[in-house]
Every structure is written in structure tokens, then in C-alpha cells.
Amino acid sequence: MGRVAHGLIARSLLRRNLAPPPFSSYAAAAAATAQRTVPIASSCGTASDVATSPRPRWRLFSLPVAPSRSVSVGLAGALSFSLTLVTAAEAKEPPSPELIPKDVVLYQYEACPFCNKVKAFLDYHDVPYKVVEVNPLSKKEIKWSDYKKVPILVVDGEQLIESSDIVKKLSQRFRPENSVIDEEETKWLRWVDDHLVHMLSPNIYRTTSEALESFDYIAKHGNFSMTERFTVKYAGAAIMYMVSKKLKKKYNITDERAALYEAAQTWTTALDGRDFLGGAKPNLADLAVYGVLRPIRYLKAGKDMVDNTKIGEWYQRMEIAVGESSRIAA
């Protein structure tokens, strides 16, 4: 379900004149919400299943029995969380229907951070797009193009390349009245490309087990034949394990995890208490950081990052704000 629908549901629930349920129902709902995690599909950007109604906040004082302090705190936290999800859901910014392209095709690798940056932008703006998964060995799917990297985005027959350029051009198309990117946004867009992306490979290929975890995902979701998958997983993991050591040296990384945590903390510091760098709504920098991190979020490196920094709350808000994938069948 999309975020707009979630917002409508929440507002509808606020208006309904229903008798309050038993106190036990409130406690159960609070416990369930507090324990809920926001899932993300491995294939493409997804939304979480949101949001409990905030209505009980205004019904607490009509309860026949005063709740215990621990349950009250849990209930208040659950309700506050649900309201945050509804607010984030209403941050979506689909372009005017006349500005939406008729045919958008993304040539990609599923695990590519730059491809995921483009997908985060398309998903957030509810732009329907088809995906062509490129075989990284033969690249036969993009032999028609002089550009031999991904992402390639074909918009109504026009080829767009380089993830940052793709996002900027589409942003200008969708928001012509607000096409100027401010200095802060520009600074962090550059930081994503020049710094954050270089933290990923040394972390997801840090150990042989992590390299195998990463390539297991790549082999399962990439465009490989059955015979290629085994080779890709084990040979690819071994190669990238060695490459990651060279990347550490190239980018002067001593401790991979410490460098990743530092990058995450740098980003959360930049938020300066805001929900998003863009304020009430994500801007291009928010979408770029989210897109780049999305392929690693549920790998060991991403889980460690969330467990050891403060980036998790922002990431969860972004999951809700970006919402479900707008990908359509090719």
C-alpha cells in the first residue's frame, strides 16, 4: 500500500466514531507496534506495512481502568511511532501527471548502489519504470549503447547515464519551478559519490563470510544462468575479497567498520535534528544516501551500521517516505 493511502487511512480512522476497545486490546496493539520492524524486499524498494491508528491517544482518559506506567509508556511510544510513520508517508512528492514519462527503462545490476540511487528517486516520485537486469559478464543487454556501465535510464527513448546526472535531470523535469539545488544539498550529493560509496566494498567484502553473503545475494538476484551462479558466487567473492583490501589502501581506510560508522555519524550530524536533510521532506541528498545504503542495509555490514550508529531512525523514515517500488513488469 502506498504512503498516500496510509495517510488517508489514518485520517479516516481519526474521524470514525467508534467505541473504545478493551484496555487489553490497546496493550496488545502497543506491544505489537513496538516490536515491529520495517521489512524491505530484497528485489526492489518496498514500503513497510504501516500504521496503527493514532485514535487511542484521545481515548486514553475514557479507559475504565488506569493503565500501569510501563504499559502507558509503551502505548505512548507506539502511538508516537505510528504518527511519525503517517507524517513520513505524507512526504511523498509525485510529479504532475503530465510530467511523468510514458516509458522508463532502467538497465541495472540489482546490487549496484548507483542503480539503487536512481531507483530510490523513481520510487519516491511514483514514476513507473521497467527494469532490465544486465549480465555483468556478457553485458549483452546494453550492447546497443556506447556506454558500457550501469545505470542506464532510457526515458521516452532518450538515454540518460551517470546516476547523479540522471537524478538531477529528472528532478529538473519534475520540479521546473524548484530546479536550483542549494549549496547544502550539492555538498552532500558530492559527498555520497566521493566518499560514502567508497565505504561499501571494503565493508561488504571485509571477510570471506561477508563476501560470500554479498555474492549469494548478487548471484540470486543477478542476471545469471544456472551454470554461472556457482562461479559468480564463489569466484566473485574471492576476487572481491582481495579487491576490497586494495580499496582500503586506495582510500586510506584502516578499519572498515569504523570508517562506515564514521560516515553514518557524519550524515546524522548533518541532519542537525531534522527528519530529513531536506527538512520535512527528503531532498536529493536524502534520496542519494538512502539509495546507496539500501543494497547493504540487511547484510551484516548494514546491520552493524544501524546497531552502532544513530542512522537507523533516519533510514526507517526514508523507507516510509520512499515507499513501495514503482517498478512495473517489463
Image (tube, grey):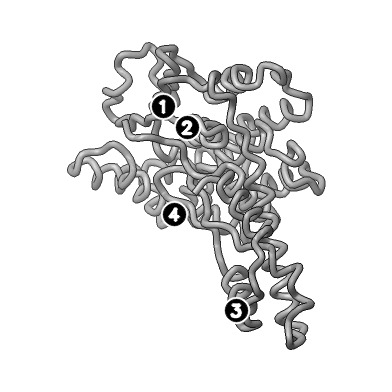
* 144 or 59, nearer to the observer: 59
User: Residue 34, labelled with which disc?
Assistant: none
Q: Are marks 1 and 4 in contact (CB under 8 Å)?
A: no
Q: Amino acid at mark 2?
A: Cys
Instruction: Say which amino acid is labelled 1.
Output: Leu
Q: Quadrant of residue 65?
A: bottom right
User: Pointer 2 and pointer 1: residues touching (CB < 8 Å)?
Assistant: yes
Q: Position of residue 181 (x, y in %)?
A: 72, 22
- Return the residue nearer the eye: 182 or 76: 76
Label 3, label 2: how far apart the Cα atoms are:
44 Å
Q: Label 2 neighbourhood size at 10 Å, few (<14), some (14-19), many (20+)?
A: many
The residue where tag 3 is placed is 25
Q: CA distance from mark 1 to mark 4?
A: 28 Å
Dot 2: what SS?
A: helix
Q: Which mark sits nearer the N-terminus, 3 or 2?
A: 3
Where residue 105 sits in the image (x, y, percent)?
39, 24
Query: How far apart in space, not on screen, are marks 3 and 1 (Cα)?
Result: 46 Å
**x then y, percent, for residue 207:** 46, 54
Q: Residue furthest front?
A: 17
Q: Which residue is mark 1?
A: 106
Give me the residue at 69% from left, 49% from top. 87
What residue is shown with label 2?
115
Left or right position of 28 against 139: right
- Callout in the foreground (3, 1): 3
Q: Which residue is mark 4?
A: 210
